[in-house]
Amino acid sequence: MIQHLAVVGATGAVGREFCALLEERRLPARRITLVASARSVGKTLRVAGGTLEVQPLTEATFQSVDFAVFAAGGAVSRQYAPIAVSQGTVVVDNSSAFRMDAEVPLVVPEVNAADLKQHRGLVANPNCSAAILVLVLAPLHRVNPIQRVVVSTYQAASGAGAAAMQELRTQTVEYLSGRPVRPVVFPHPIAFNLFSHDSPVGSDGYNQEETKLVEETRKILHAPELAVAPTCVRVPVLRAHSESATLTFEHPITVELARETLAGAAGLKVVDDAEQRRFPMPVEASGRDAVLVGRIRRDLSQPDGRGLQLFLCGDQLRKGAALNAIQILEALTQPG
């Protein structure tokens, strides 16, 4: 039982999703405090069957708080998470601030829940694209070690927050009405368009999203030598990310074994009906806990039988963020 839970960034897209999931998952918490930026203070949200008023974030927020979920961005996490931990609060942080810290476990519970035993008051929630990818890679990696992953992501507007989702809605109306499309949140029009992920590009030519995908996948899988070649793209989808992955295994692997392995894995649903041409789609992944995986087929460019190709979709706001944080809290608070 959680005695006092704080939700930092409660009015953002991830925070609101987290609050909705609190009731859906029936996470036991005697007291809940909602926290957000100054412009949201005083707003009310429905949480766990009641209505709560949003409070300001201060250093005193975490007095008597035993667990806190941060969904307010890296700057807020870097400033306030250490304060919370110093006051005895266990923090689950959704930002990138601590993910690659060697002393902070980066956890997808279906994959590496055992890493939670190493926490020192702080647990990192992975990047959304990494979270849904490792759910698919991990069960396959256990039966036949993966040596290389070539992955292209098709990332929804939800990954950039509530304002980005609204921008997609607004631009769609503008475009269909023949009015000029005005990008504000994104650097380019998102309606009827796609572009390289909007995070900064480093000197190596990879944007930050691609670098996160490489580093976090390796850390979660405990596979520091895993070769990952990513391309991350923003697409005009409201929510739910999609990913196309080509895998190279240490040993030959059959499509049948891969499909059987994925069908039995936690957090996944195989959608792979070639006859009906039904495969994972973001419209069907949206609002669902499970990550959908399909298009499972041999990579014909690897004639030695060590290659597979597949396609997956997962709800960025759920398994890519809020749901994973809920599952971490459930794992941290379960008896034993």
Image (cartoon, grey):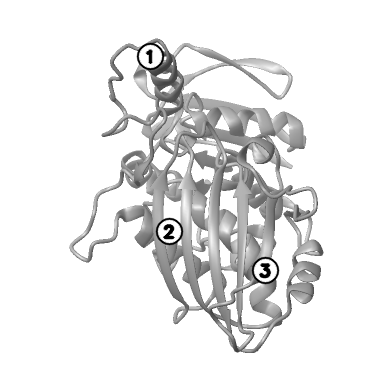
Q: Residues within 10 Å of mark 3 (few under 14, many from 20)?
A: some
Task: Kindly indicate whether the residue at mark 1 contacts the one at mark 3 (C-beta within 8 angstroms).
Answer: no
Query: What residue sits right under mark 1 in the picture?
Result: 174
- The disc, 2 or 1, on the residue closer to the chain's N-terminal end is 2
Q: Which mark is residue 99?
A: 2
Of the two numbered discs 2 and 1 in the rendering, the one whose residue sits closer to the viewer: 1
Task: Kindly indicate whether the residue at mark 1 contacts the one at mark 2 (C-beta within 8 angstroms).
Answer: no
User: How far from the left and from the top, in percent, is residue 50?
Assistant: 69, 16
Q: Residues within 10 Å of mark 1 (few under 14, many from 20)?
A: some
Q: Give residue 240's quadrant in the image.
A: top right
Q: Is residue 127 visible?
A: no
Query: What residue sits right under mark 3 in the picture?
Result: 297
- Helix, strand or loop at disc 1? helix
Q: Which residue is at the front of the view, 54 or 265?
A: 265
Identified at 55% across, 82% down, the residue is: 302
Of the two numbered discs 3 and 2 in the rendering, the one whose residue sits closer to the viewer: 3
Q: CA distance from mark 3 to mark 2?
A: 33 Å
